Image (tube, rainbow, N blue to C red):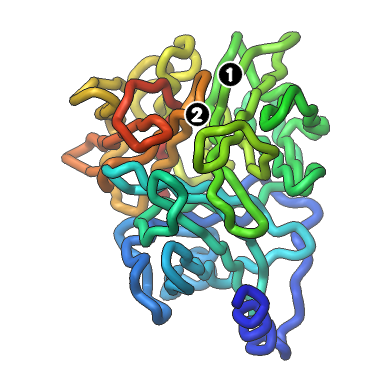
Amino acid sequence: MRLRLFLTLVLAAAATFLVPAAAQAVPGDKWATVFVDKPSVTTWTVASTAKQWGSWKNSYPSLWADTMKVNTGRVFVRLPKVQSYPLQGVAHVTAVSATGNYCEVFRIFPSGGNQYVDVTCFRPGGALADTQFSLLWTLGSGVLAAGQGSQAYLERDISTVAQTYNSTGVANTLATVSTGVYRATFPGVAAGGLSGNVQVSAYHHLGAPRRCKLATWALTGAADITADIACFDQNGAPIAGEFVVSCHRERASYGLRGGVLPRSFGYLTTGGPFNTNYNYKAGGWGVNTVAVTSPGRYLVTYPQLGMGGETNVQVTATGPGSGYCSLAALWIHSGTTATADVKCFDNAGVATAQDFSATFDGKY
């Protein structure tokens, strides 16, 4: 089935040349954010236009990302006019589910001038399940000047580092700590102590149920971040993992910042230091808040980020164990404030207290 679907897409694009990724560009030179609101529809259908945006909008303002269910729990997301090759960019996915469903990236591939992200989702226990989710895809290149924040990411495939990028121009590294645990080092991305935000998403080349999280992170040296990523199977057992881990500081999670749109972004890490809570439009550090609404459920409030609907939220569980987090419901805009409803679970899908890292991005 996977091969037949892939060949169908490739044959449809037979007359289209693959476009190499830009060699000298700016961080976040290609990106997309999409809320996949129709995971059960089996024909190509435009995803929520109120909750998507992408770098193609500058040249093709009338185009929208669309989605198609391939089979139960599996969705293709088609991002228009952002095809990249040989590097595919990286993607984060966060399930929108109050019952403990979770999602992973199956694969990313180009065809017909578009970029496709193939996503699979599961219910607790590992059975495939149609699930809404929030998607972020980005491809970065180039080096940022000092004082412009930072962006970096690293993708591990079956056994090696498949893609890596760091806006400082210094190479990221990855080491195996133990079964299912890996240590990524991002040189130069922090400032003033441990700072910024880290997101992790599981990948799997066969679509087997996997979850990965941020076990711990630390500042090493003057400005390097080390992030330990832990991966688990559907039973909560540590297992060799495929994943993407990314970090961003004082920038949107897909790279853009400041005088270059967008400026509406914020992030926080519960249990983290002051510098890991940041909101660009609301004045900097320590502005976003978290309130417990029920066991394992949290309301994250981002002041001044509620204007404009084309926004995206990603959430990653942090800390020990196999617990994980998702969005219990779609994030909300109310006046100038945006809120995200985060819910965390144990391996059985029971709501449980859990630290997490959350990031919010808008086009404005």
Label 1 environment density (alpha carbons within 10 Å; few <14, some 14–19, many ≥20):
some
Determine the image quadrant of residue 342.
Answer: top left
| Image position of 83 (left or right of 58) | right
Residue ID at (62%, 73%): 2
- Can you tell which of label 1 and label 2 is closer to the viewer? 2
Disc 1 element? strand
* Disc 2 packing (10 Å; few <14; some 14–19; many ≥20): many
Where residue 285 sits: x, y (%)?
A: 42, 17
- The residue at 32%/25% (across/down) is 352
Q: Mark 1 points at which residue?
A: 216
Is residue 158 among what the camera can see?
A: yes
**Relative image position of residue 193 (x, y in whole percent):** 60, 9
The answer for how far apart the CA atoms under marks 1 and 2 are is 13 Å
Name which quarter of the figure residue 159 lies in.
top right
Residue 161: mark: none
In this image, 219 relative to 285: left or right? right
Residue type (three-letter) at the residue carrying disc 1 = Thr
Residue 164 percent location from the top left of the image: 75, 42
Q: Residue 316 at x, y = what percent?
A: 47, 33
Image mark for residue 322:
2
SS at circle 2: loop
Taking the image as shown, residue 6 lies to the left or right of residue 296, namely right
* Quadrant (top left/top right/bottom left/bottom right) for the N terminus: bottom right
Decide if residue 307 is in sight here.
no
Q: Which residue is drawn at 28% across and 41% down?
A: 328
